[in-house]
Image: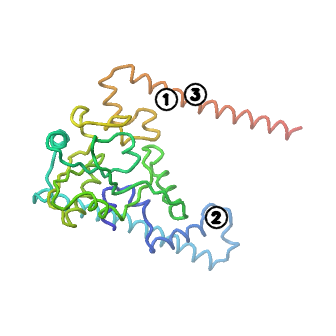
Amino acid sequence: MASLALPFPKLLVISRSNSQNKPTIKFWAKTRYLNSSKIPSWRLGPAYAKNLQCGVIRMQAGEEDYELKQMRDVAAAKKRWDALIREGKVKVLTPREAGYAVQLSNKPLLDVRPSTEREKAWVKGSTWIPIFDVDSKFDVGALSRKLTNFVMGGWWSGMPTLSYDSQFLSKVEEKFSKDTDLIVACQKGLRSLAACELLYNSGYRNLFWVQGGLEAAEEEELAREGPQSLKFAGIGGVSEFLGWTDQQRAAAAKEGWGYRLLFSARLVGVFLVADALILGAQQVGRYLQEIRSH
């Protein structure tokens, strides 16, 4: 299960739900008041304060060990994926070649992207079975992972918290026999490699991986459906709103000043709203101060 999250360095942190990490989360919930100086340590007693300090140190050491494990797992996954391609177990296709195979040879294309990307744009005639999808749970652990994801960059990139679909393989097997020439694609090409590894290990031997993902496809290379371009299906959050993604900058270079002015106006609007909020807060503060003085 750990290897399944390897294509997503961010998700390795936010998807932790094993029993080893749960006590750490609970312990942190008990110590947050001491760390925020809301309860003086002398009121808790020297023995409690000492144990608390040791617990925090152990928690920090555990976090460092987990980060190190992530790096090792990612490196191991990369070696496995390189071997799959080098040994010819998974064939490589460019987006253009994938388009030819789908349109001219009627080869099936398996889209393993999450729903947030699929609903924006998809390849006409493709089959959608996400290997990871948006985590819809709302228990304590899920909320903690969602908050961590947001703080660690989800607000900027728009990437939601994702969880592995344990029914992925069975869903694929319902649609495609194991001798099918199957083209596997995702947005950037990483999750589809993880899917190819799973599929190969389960008996699929005619796998084709779209290098660079659907994001690398030019508009004319794949028959697209959906409200947006395939290149823009993976962006979101504040970065998309302000036009600060690589895809939007490339589009601005092609389309000229009209495209740039739109996002420049949005940026100016953000500054004006922020300035108005600050000014309003200052005025409320002065008003409250005048009330107290009277």
* Residue under pointer 1: 267
* Residue under pointer 3: 272
Residue 254 point in image, percent of width and height: 29, 24
Position of residue 66 in the picture relative to residue 55 (left or right): left
Q: Which amino acid does label 2 sit on?
A: Tyr
Q: Which residue is drawn at 64% across and 34% down?
A: 277
Disc 3 to disc 2, C-alpha distance: 36 Å
Front position in the image: 282 or 80: 80
Give whichever of discs 1 and 3 has the lower sequence position.
Answer: 1
Q: How is the image coloured?
A: rainbow
* Residue under pointer 2: 33
Give whichever of discs 3 and 2 has the lower sequence position.
Answer: 2
Instruction: Look at the numbered discs 3 and 2 and tell me whether their residues touch, using CB distance below 8 Å.
Output: no
**Mark 2, secondary structure of its residue:** helix
**Mark 3, secondary structure of its residue:** helix
Residue 225 point in image, percent of width and height: 32, 37
Q: Which amino acid does label 1 sit on?
A: Leu
Residue 244 point in image, percent of width and height: 40, 34
* Outermost residue, right side: 294
Front position in the image: 22 or 88: 88
Name the disc covering residue 280, or none: none
Tell me the crowding category of disc 2: few under 14, some 14 to 19, or many 20 or more residues within 10 angstroms, Cα based: few
Q: In which quarter of the image is the N terminus?
A: bottom left
Position of residue 86 in the picture relative to residue 135 (left or right): left
Tell me the crowding category of disc 3: few under 14, some 14 to 19, or many 20 or more residues within 10 angstroms, Cα based: few
Give whichever of discs 1 and 2 has the lower sequence position.
Answer: 2
Q: Quadrant of the C terminus?
A: top right
**Mark 1, secondary structure of its residue:** helix
Disc 1 to disc 3, C-alpha distance: 9 Å
Residue 92 lies, with reference to residue 260, above or below; the image says below
Front position in the image: 14 or 132: 132
